Image (cartoon, grey):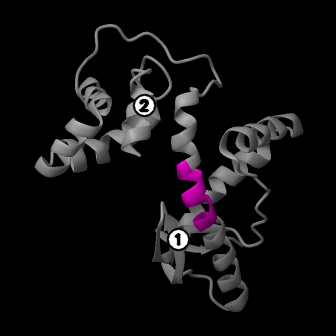
Amino acid sequence: VLAELDNHFSKNDYLLGHRPCAGDFGLMGPLYAHLYRDPAPGALIQQKAPNVVKWVERMNSCPENVTDWHDEGVIPDSLYPLLARIFGEFWPVLLNTVAKTQEWIASNPQQDAIPTTIGTHEFKMGEAIETRAILTFHQWKFQRVSDLYESFSAQEKANINRVFKQKLGLTIDTVNIHQRLTRKNNKLVVDS
């Protein structure tokens, strides 16, 4: 990830151009707190990803020459390797989480409240295969992404699908969520 980010920041001041976007602020917390400021990872990032270091320092300063983002809808080609990694590693986990949550709801029709976890499943990051809890909260979060995708026109969906296939090697299919989740009193429940 550091190599992919370093390559991107060698050509771009920020993720989407010459001013920070929400994604920059999302990355800043973990990269600054867990890598840049910690002595051992800080030395590693200084050595292996000097452009990421420059980005962290830009994010921590008040830049004088902030211009604009790239043209609307344009994702720099240098971000696609990172996006391919993220989607390649997390998309299968997310789809499995939704499927397992739907199975749990179908198997427990008498329960409105949804547990925080409903077992475990394997995931792969790089070459490592590990096990993690199936967190039902992720379906609730995914519903917003799914709803946005479903709100697009057929042409917009076709454009998104084309980019995902060509640039990321992934296919986005509609994820059918039969039983939606909602929050009630700060707990997840089946949406009635």
Examine the rendering and report whether any part of residue 139 can be seen.
no
Residue 181, x across and y down, in percent: 63, 69
Name the residue tied to disc 1.
123
Classify residue 189 by image quadrant: bottom right
- State left or right for residue 68 relative to residue 87: left
Question: Residue sitting at 43 percent across and 9 percent down?
Answer: 67
User: Magenta stretch?
Assistant: 85-94
Of pointers 2 and 1, the one earlier in the residue sequence:
2
Examine the rendering and report whether any part of residue 64 can be seen.
yes
Queried whether the magenta region covers residue 93, the answer comes back as yes
Say if 117 sits above or below 86 in the image: below
Question: Residue sitting at 65 percent across and 58 percent down?
Answer: 143
- The residue nearer to you, when weighing 11 against 47, is 47
Residue 11, x across and y down, in percent: 44, 20
- The residue nearer to you, when weighing 140 against 21, is 21
Q: Main secondary structure of the magenta part?
A: helix
Name the residue tied to disc 2.
7
Classify residue 111 by image quadrant: bottom right
Question: Residue sitting at 79 percent across and 65 percent down?
Answer: 176
Question: Residue sitting at 62 percent across and 83 percent down?
Answer: 112
